Image (tube, grey):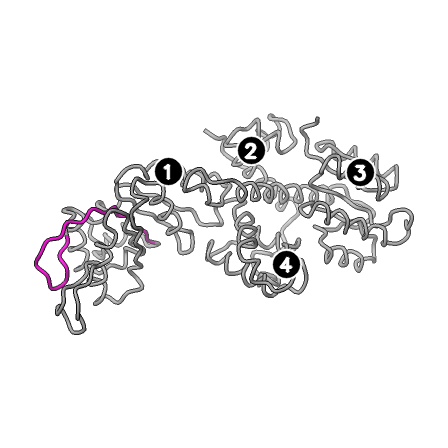
Amino acid sequence: MSERPRLLVVEDDPGLQRQLKWAYEAYEVLLAADRPGALAALEAADPPVVTLDLGLPPDPDGVSEGLALLEEILARRPHAKVIVASGHGDRESARRAIALGAFDFYQKPIDIDELGFIVGRAFHVANLEAENRRLQARTPDTPLGAIVTGSPEMLKVCAMVERVAATNVSVLLLGASGTGKEVLARALHAASPRAAGPFVAINCAAIPENLLEAELFGYERGAFTGAVKTTEGKIELAKGGTLFLDEVGDIPLPLQVKLLRFIQERVIERVGGRRSIPVDVRIVCATHQNLKAMIADGRFREDLFYRIAEVTITIPPLKDRPGDALLLAHHFLQKHAGQRPGGPVRFGPSAVAAINLHSWPGNVRELENRVKRAIIMADGPAITAEDLDLADSPDLRPVPLKEARAQSDRRAILAALAASGGSVSQAARALGISRPTLYDLMRELGIDQPA
C-alpha cells in the first residue's frame, strides 16, 4: 500500500486524466471516468479528497450526473473534501455544488498551480478534521485528554500541567482573556491527588472590593449589617481541594496582605472573628495582567507574587496555536449542534477559510460564541463566513498566491509535526513528501526542528 495521500480524480477525458496524474505525483492518484467507477474507488480506497468534473457520462454536456455523484459521495463519506470542476460562465453549477456540500470548485481550463493549491488546502483541512475526530472519539486516559488541541505550543502547556499536578506547588496561569485558564485549572485539579476534594473558583474581578474579603475568608455572625449567620468563605469551602483565584491581579492591596498571610501560614480568620482556622488547600491563580509591571507600579505585592507563582504557565493565544481554531470549531459544532431545530450543519469552504485566517482576538471564548451564532443563523446545511459574522473581517483580505501557499504549507507542516509528536519522518509520511523535502520546507518557512 502506498503511504502517499490518496486523491480520487473523477474525469472522463483520458488526456486530462494523464495530465493530472503526472502533475500530482506527491499523491496516490486514483482515476475514475464515471459514477460507478468513482463509487467503486471510493469504497475501495476511501480517499479524503476528490476532484470531480460535473460533466460525466451519460450527461457529459450537463451537470446532472456530476451533481448526483457529489450527493452520493457525501452520503457515503460525509467527511470527504470534494472539489468540483466548473466551466467558464457556469458559476451557477458551482454554487449548487457548494450548497450540496462540495469543499470548493475550480474553473476549466485547468490551471495546475491553482488546482494544486486548492487540493493541498483540502488535504490540510481533511487532516485537521480527522485529528479532531480522533481527539473527540478517544477515551481520555488523563484529565487533560479531553482538551482539544493539536498545536505543539499547547501540547507543551498540557505536558507542563500534568507534571506539576502531582505536586502541591502554587501555580500561576498567565494568558489573555478567553484562552482557557479555568479549563486548565480544573484539569490540573482533576489530575492531582486532591481530585476527590472540591474545586472552588472565584473571579476576583467580578466581586466588589468591599465584599471580596468576606467572600474569600467568610464572616462571623454580626460582623457587619446583614451578617445574620456565620458563613464559610471560599477558602474554607476548598478545604482538601483546590482554590482557583481567577484575575488575581484585581485583588486590592490591603487584601493582598491578608491573602499572603494565609498562603504563608495556611490559617485564616473570618471577618469579625478572632479564631485562627487551619485550612489545607492548594492555590491556583490566573490573570491576563502583567503582574511584574504591576509590582513595579506598586499595585501588586512582590512577596505575594512569588508565593502564588512557584510555577508559572503561560497559555498561548489562539492565533499562535496553528490548526487549533478549526479543531475547536468542529468541537463546538458538535457540542452545540442540538441548538439547531433543522438538520445537521457543517462548515462550508468560506467558513473554513475564515476560521483559519481570523486572528481571534477573543480567543477560544470568541470562537465558541461565533460557532453558536452560526449554528442558529445558517440557512442551509453549510455554515458560511457570513454565518460566523466574519465575512467582512480584515483578516480575510486577499493575499498574494505565493504568500497564501506559504501560510497553508506552514499550517499543514506544523499540524503534521504536532500529530506525529515531533517526528519529522512520520510527519513527512503523513504529508506525502520525503524527509529531505520536509527539512527544506521547514528551513524555508522558518519552522524550528523539533528537539
Indicate which disc, 3 or 1, sits on the residue closer to the N terminus.
3
Question: Could you give the CA–CA distance between mark 3 and mark 1, rounded to whole angstroms?
Answer: 46 Å
Q: Amino acid at mark 2?
A: Met
Horizontal and vertical percent for residue 276? Answer: 10, 53
User: Where is mark 1, residue-wise?
Assistant: 162
Question: Could you give the CA–CA distance between mark 4 and mark 3, rounded to whole angstroms?
Answer: 30 Å
Graded by Cα atoms within 10 Å as few (under 14), some (14 to 19) or many (20 or more), the crowding at tag 1 reads: many
Q: Quadrant of the N terminus?
A: top right
Which numbered circle lies on residue 383?
4
Q: Which residues are magenta?
A: 268-287
> Residue 286 in magenta?
yes
Indicate which disc, 4 or 1, sits on the residue closer to the N terminus.
1
Q: Nearer the viewer, mark 2 or mark 1?
A: 1
Which numbered circle lies on residue 40?
3
Indicate which disc, 3 or 2, sits on the residue closer to the N terminus.
3
Secondary element at image label 1: helix
Graded by Cα atoms within 10 Å as few (under 14), some (14 to 19) or many (20 or more), the crowding at tag 4 reads: many
User: Where is mark 2, residue-wise?
Assistant: 442
Question: Could you give the CA–CA distance between mark 2 and mark 1, rounded to whole angstroms?
Answer: 29 Å
Horizontal and vertical percent for residue 242? Answer: 28, 48
